[in-house]
Amino acid sequence: MRIHTGELPFPCKVCNKRFRQQSNLTQHQRTHASTKPFLCNYCGKGFRFKGDMLRHTRIHTGERPFKCNICQKSFRQSSHLNHHKITHLRGRKYICKLCGYCTANKGHMECHKVKHTGERPFQCSMCGKRFSQGSHMRAHHVKHTGERPFPCTVCGKRFSQKSSLNFHHVKHTGERPFQCSVCGKNFSQKNNMKRHQLKHTGERPYGCSICGKRFARLDNMKLHQVKHTGERPYGCPICGKRFAYKSNLNQHRAIVHFGYTKF
Protein backbone atom coordinates (compact mmCIF):
# COMPACT_ATOMS: atom_id res chain seq x y z
CA MET A 1 0.00 0.00 0.00
CA ARG A 2 2.84 2.43 0.82
CA ILE A 3 4.09 2.09 -2.78
CA HIS A 4 0.90 3.86 -3.88
CA THR A 5 0.64 6.38 -1.03
CA GLY A 6 4.32 7.33 -0.99
CA GLU A 7 4.33 7.07 2.80
CA LEU A 8 7.83 6.85 4.34
CA PRO A 9 7.25 6.26 8.06
CA PHE A 10 10.77 5.13 9.04
CA PRO A 11 13.29 8.02 9.44
CA CYS A 12 17.05 7.65 9.93
CA LYS A 13 18.07 9.30 13.22
CA VAL A 14 21.47 10.22 11.77
CA CYS A 15 20.67 11.91 8.43
CA ASN A 16 16.82 12.11 8.57
CA LYS A 17 16.41 10.20 5.30
CA ARG A 18 13.10 8.31 5.34
CA PHE A 19 12.21 4.79 4.22
CA ARG A 20 9.12 2.81 3.36
CA GLN A 21 10.09 -0.30 5.39
CA GLN A 22 11.98 -0.92 8.62
CA SER A 23 14.27 -3.41 6.86
CA ASN A 24 15.33 -0.71 4.37
CA LEU A 25 16.09 1.70 7.21
CA THR A 26 18.16 -0.93 9.02
CA GLN A 27 20.18 -1.62 5.86
CA HIS A 28 20.74 2.13 5.34
CA GLN A 29 21.86 2.72 8.94
CA ARG A 30 24.78 0.38 8.41
CA THR A 31 26.27 2.92 5.99
CA HIS A 32 26.67 5.27 8.95
CA ALA A 33 28.11 2.54 11.15
CA SER A 34 30.82 1.67 8.58
CA THR A 35 32.32 -1.63 9.80
CA LYS A 36 30.00 -1.61 12.83
CA PRO A 37 26.66 -2.84 11.46
CA PHE A 38 24.97 -3.71 14.77
CA LEU A 39 23.35 -0.61 16.26
CA CYS A 40 22.07 -0.04 19.78
CA ASN A 41 18.34 0.72 19.67
CA TYR A 42 18.72 3.11 22.60
CA CYS A 43 21.66 5.36 21.65
CA GLY A 44 22.57 4.36 18.09
CA LYS A 45 26.12 3.31 18.92
CA GLY A 46 27.50 0.81 16.38
CA PHE A 47 29.30 -2.47 17.04
CA ARG A 48 31.19 -4.95 14.89
CA PHE A 49 29.61 -7.96 16.56
CA LYS A 50 26.05 -8.61 17.67
CA GLY A 51 27.20 -10.02 21.02
CA ASP A 52 29.04 -6.78 21.82
CA MET A 53 25.92 -4.79 21.01
CA LEU A 54 23.75 -7.00 23.25
CA ARG A 55 26.19 -6.62 26.15
CA HIS A 56 26.20 -2.84 25.64
CA THR A 57 22.39 -2.72 25.61
CA ARG A 58 22.31 -3.96 29.21
CA ILE A 59 23.78 -0.60 30.25
CA HIS A 60 20.45 0.95 29.19
CA THR A 61 18.13 -1.82 30.41
CA GLY A 62 19.89 -2.54 33.70
CA GLU A 63 19.60 -6.26 32.99
CA ARG A 64 21.99 -8.46 34.99
CA PRO A 65 21.40 -12.01 33.70
CA PHE A 66 24.55 -13.65 35.08
CA LYS A 67 24.05 -14.71 38.70
CA CYS A 68 26.63 -16.13 41.10
CA ASN A 69 25.41 -19.56 42.23
CA ILE A 70 27.16 -19.08 45.57
CA CYS A 71 26.01 -15.65 46.82
CA GLN A 72 23.28 -14.85 44.21
CA LYS A 73 24.91 -11.53 43.22
CA SER A 74 24.07 -10.60 39.60
CA PHE A 75 26.27 -9.20 36.84
CA ARG A 76 25.83 -7.60 33.44
CA GLN A 77 28.55 -9.67 31.73
CA SER A 78 29.73 -13.26 32.18
CA SER A 79 33.35 -12.08 32.43
CA HIS A 80 32.42 -9.93 35.44
CA LEU A 81 30.76 -12.94 37.06
CA ASN A 82 33.82 -15.13 36.50
CA HIS A 83 36.08 -12.46 38.01
CA HIS A 84 33.74 -12.18 41.01
CA LYS A 85 33.72 -15.94 41.61
CA ILE A 86 37.43 -15.81 42.41
CA THR A 87 36.47 -14.16 45.72
CA HIS A 88 34.71 -17.39 46.72
CA LEU A 89 37.56 -19.72 45.82
CA ARG A 90 39.41 -19.52 49.14
CA GLY A 91 39.40 -23.10 50.42
CA ARG A 92 37.42 -24.34 47.39
CA LYS A 93 39.87 -26.24 45.23
CA TYR A 94 37.39 -28.11 42.99
CA ILE A 95 36.00 -26.03 40.12
CA CYS A 96 33.57 -27.20 37.41
CA LYS A 97 35.02 -26.33 34.00
CA LEU A 98 31.57 -26.16 32.42
CA CYS A 99 29.72 -23.72 34.70
CA GLY A 100 32.21 -22.43 37.28
CA TYR A 101 30.63 -24.10 40.32
CA CYS A 102 33.26 -24.49 43.04
CA THR A 103 33.47 -26.52 46.25
CA ALA A 104 35.98 -27.75 48.81
CA ASN A 105 34.41 -31.21 48.79
CA LYS A 106 35.42 -33.66 46.05
CA GLY A 107 32.27 -35.73 46.57
CA HIS A 108 30.07 -32.68 46.05
CA MET A 109 31.88 -31.95 42.80
CA GLU A 110 31.35 -35.51 41.54
CA CYS A 111 27.63 -35.20 42.30
CA HIS A 112 27.51 -31.84 40.53
CA LYS A 113 29.25 -33.07 37.35
CA VAL A 114 26.51 -35.56 36.51
CA LYS A 115 24.17 -32.60 35.93
CA HIS A 116 26.20 -31.90 32.79
CA THR A 117 26.99 -35.47 31.68
CA GLY A 118 23.57 -37.02 32.26
CA GLU A 119 25.25 -40.03 33.92
CA ARG A 120 22.98 -42.17 36.16
CA PRO A 121 25.16 -44.50 38.26
CA PHE A 122 22.59 -45.22 41.00
CA GLN A 123 19.95 -47.87 40.24
CA CYS A 124 16.79 -48.71 42.18
CA SER A 125 16.93 -52.37 43.24
CA MET A 126 13.16 -52.76 42.90
CA CYS A 127 12.30 -51.27 39.50
CA GLY A 128 15.66 -50.65 37.84
CA LYS A 129 15.19 -46.91 37.38
CA ARG A 130 18.51 -45.05 37.37
CA PHE A 131 19.49 -41.80 39.08
CA SER A 132 22.32 -39.29 38.95
CA GLN A 133 22.59 -39.05 42.75
CA GLY A 134 22.24 -41.55 45.55
CA SER A 135 19.96 -39.22 47.52
CA HIS A 136 17.55 -39.08 44.57
CA MET A 137 17.52 -42.86 44.32
CA ARG A 138 16.78 -43.21 48.05
CA ALA A 139 13.99 -40.64 47.83
CA HIS A 140 12.52 -42.61 44.90
CA HIS A 141 12.76 -45.90 46.81
CA VAL A 142 10.10 -44.87 49.32
CA LYS A 143 7.55 -44.94 46.49
CA HIS A 144 7.90 -48.72 46.60
CA THR A 145 7.90 -49.03 50.41
CA GLY A 146 5.02 -46.62 50.98
CA GLU A 147 6.94 -44.88 53.76
CA ARG A 148 5.88 -41.26 54.44
CA PRO A 149 8.13 -39.93 57.20
CA PHE A 150 7.54 -36.18 56.65
CA PRO A 151 4.27 -34.78 58.14
CA CYS A 152 2.84 -31.30 57.49
CA THR A 153 2.63 -29.40 60.78
CA VAL A 154 -0.46 -27.50 59.57
CA CYS A 155 -2.80 -30.19 58.21
CA GLY A 156 -1.05 -33.44 59.15
CA LYS A 157 -0.70 -34.76 55.60
CA ARG A 158 2.37 -36.96 55.25
CA PHE A 159 4.95 -37.09 52.46
CA SER A 160 7.62 -39.50 51.30
CA GLN A 161 10.10 -36.70 50.55
CA LYS A 162 11.01 -33.55 52.45
CA SER A 163 11.02 -31.54 49.21
CA SER A 164 7.40 -32.60 48.60
CA LEU A 165 6.49 -31.44 52.11
CA ASN A 166 8.16 -28.07 51.52
CA PHE A 167 6.35 -27.69 48.20
CA HIS A 168 3.04 -28.54 49.89
CA HIS A 169 3.62 -26.18 52.81
CA VAL A 170 3.54 -23.03 50.66
CA LYS A 171 -0.11 -23.83 49.88
CA HIS A 172 -0.83 -22.91 53.48
CA THR A 173 1.46 -19.86 53.68
CA GLY A 174 1.19 -18.51 50.13
CA GLU A 175 4.83 -17.53 50.49
CA ARG A 176 6.89 -16.78 47.35
CA PRO A 177 10.34 -15.94 48.72
CA PHE A 178 12.38 -16.44 45.54
CA GLN A 179 12.47 -13.43 43.21
CA CYS A 180 13.85 -13.23 39.68
CA SER A 181 16.60 -10.59 39.66
CA VAL A 182 15.80 -9.65 36.05
CA CYS A 183 12.02 -9.14 35.97
CA GLY A 184 11.03 -9.32 39.65
CA LYS A 185 8.65 -12.28 39.34
CA ASN A 186 8.32 -14.24 42.59
CA PHE A 187 8.32 -18.02 43.02
CA SER A 188 7.52 -20.40 45.84
CA GLN A 189 10.35 -22.76 44.86
CA LYS A 190 13.98 -21.87 44.15
CA ASN A 191 14.26 -24.41 41.31
CA ASN A 192 11.24 -22.88 39.56
CA MET A 193 12.87 -19.46 39.79
CA LYS A 194 16.14 -20.79 38.34
CA ARG A 195 14.32 -22.45 35.42
CA HIS A 196 12.48 -19.19 34.76
CA GLN A 197 15.73 -17.17 34.70
CA LEU A 198 17.06 -19.24 31.81
CA LYS A 199 14.46 -17.47 29.65
CA HIS A 200 16.33 -14.23 30.27
CA THR A 201 19.89 -15.49 29.91
CA GLY A 202 19.36 -17.98 27.07
CA GLU A 203 21.69 -20.30 28.99
CA ARG A 204 21.64 -23.99 28.07
CA PRO A 205 23.80 -25.70 30.71
CA TYR A 206 22.92 -29.31 29.87
CA GLY A 207 24.71 -30.83 26.88
CA CYS A 208 23.98 -34.17 25.21
CA SER A 209 27.12 -36.28 25.59
CA ILE A 210 26.45 -37.95 22.22
CA CYS A 211 25.66 -35.14 19.76
CA GLY A 212 26.46 -32.02 21.79
CA LYS A 213 23.00 -30.45 21.52
CA ARG A 214 22.36 -28.24 24.53
CA PHE A 215 19.27 -27.78 26.66
CA ALA A 216 18.04 -25.36 29.29
CA ARG A 217 16.54 -28.15 31.40
CA LEU A 218 18.02 -31.47 32.46
CA ASP A 219 14.77 -33.39 31.94
CA ASN A 220 14.57 -32.19 28.32
CA MET A 221 18.15 -33.32 27.71
CA LYS A 222 17.34 -36.75 29.15
CA LEU A 223 14.27 -37.06 26.93
CA HIS A 224 16.43 -36.18 23.93
CA GLN A 225 19.12 -38.74 24.74
CA VAL A 226 16.82 -41.74 24.41
CA LYS A 227 16.78 -41.01 20.67
CA HIS A 228 20.46 -42.00 20.63
CA THR A 229 20.46 -44.82 23.17
CA GLY A 230 17.21 -46.54 22.26
CA GLU A 231 16.60 -46.86 26.00
CA ARG A 232 13.06 -47.74 27.07
CA PRO A 233 13.03 -47.12 30.83
CA TYR A 234 9.25 -47.11 31.32
CA GLY A 235 7.72 -50.58 31.58
CA CYS A 236 4.00 -51.37 31.65
CA PRO A 237 3.26 -53.17 34.96
CA ILE A 238 0.44 -55.12 33.30
CA CYS A 239 1.94 -56.55 30.10
CA GLY A 240 5.63 -55.66 30.41
CA LYS A 241 5.85 -53.65 27.18
CA ARG A 242 8.48 -50.94 27.47
CA PHE A 243 8.52 -47.32 26.28
CA ALA A 244 11.04 -44.54 25.82
CA TYR A 245 8.71 -41.87 27.23
CA LYS A 246 6.40 -41.91 30.22
CA SER A 247 3.66 -40.19 28.21
CA ASN A 248 3.69 -43.10 25.73
CA LEU A 249 3.37 -45.59 28.60
CA ASN A 250 0.40 -43.71 30.04
CA GLN A 251 -1.28 -43.61 26.63
CA HIS A 252 -0.67 -47.35 26.15
CA ARG A 253 -2.21 -48.24 29.52
CA ALA A 254 -5.25 -46.03 28.96
CA ILE A 255 -6.05 -47.40 25.49
CA VAL A 256 -4.92 -51.04 25.64
CA HIS A 257 -5.70 -51.98 29.23
CA PHE A 258 -8.41 -49.56 30.36
CA GLY A 259 -10.38 -49.18 27.13
CA TYR A 260 -10.11 -45.43 26.64
CA THR A 261 -10.61 -44.16 23.08
CA LYS A 262 -7.78 -42.25 21.42
CA PHE A 263 -8.81 -38.84 20.10
Image (spheres, grey):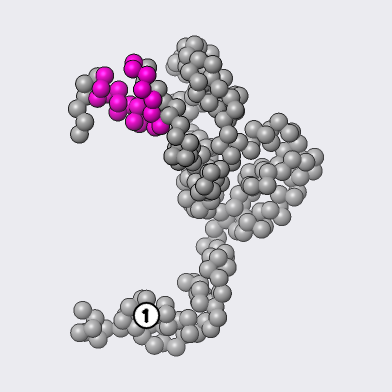
Quadrant in the rendering for residue 48 = bottom right
Kindly indicate the quadrant of the structure image that contains residue 250: top left
What secondary structure do most residues of the magenta stretch adopt? Answer: helix
Residue 184 appears in the picture as rendered: no
Q: Considering the image in quadrants, where does the N terminus appear?
A: bottom left
Residue 20 in picture, x, y percent from top left: 31, 81
Q: Is residue 141 left or right of residue 67?
A: left
Which residue lies most toward the right here?
91
Amino acid type at circle 1 is Asn
Query: 221 or 235, which lies in front?
Result: 235
62 shown above or below 216: below
Task: Pick whichever, 199 or 175, lies toward us.
Answer: 199
Q: Is residue 49 magenta?
A: no
Query: Bounds of the magenta span?
Result: 238-257
What residue lies at 55% left-to-right and 27% top-to-bottom? 131
The answer to which of 155 and 159 lies nearer the viewer is 159
Up-down relation of residue 142 to residue 200 (above or below):
above
Q: Quadrant of the C terminus?
A: top left
Examine the rendered structure and indicate whether residue 216 appears above or below residue 256. below
Residue 243: within the magenta? Answer: yes
* Residue 9 placement (x, y as % from top left): 32, 80
- Can residue 96 be seen in this snapshot? yes
Residue pointed to by mark 1: 24
- On screen, residue 220 versus residue 111, left or right, reads left
Q: What residue lies at 53% left-to-right and 26% top-to-bottom?
A: 130
Identify which residue is drawn at 30% across, 26% down: 252
Query: In the figure, is residue 41 to the left or right of 21?
Result: right
Spot occupied by residue 245 in the image (x, y as percentages of width and height) = 39, 32
Q: Mark 1 packing: few (<14 Cα in 10 Å), some, or many (20+)? A: few
Percent position of residue 239, x then y: 33, 17
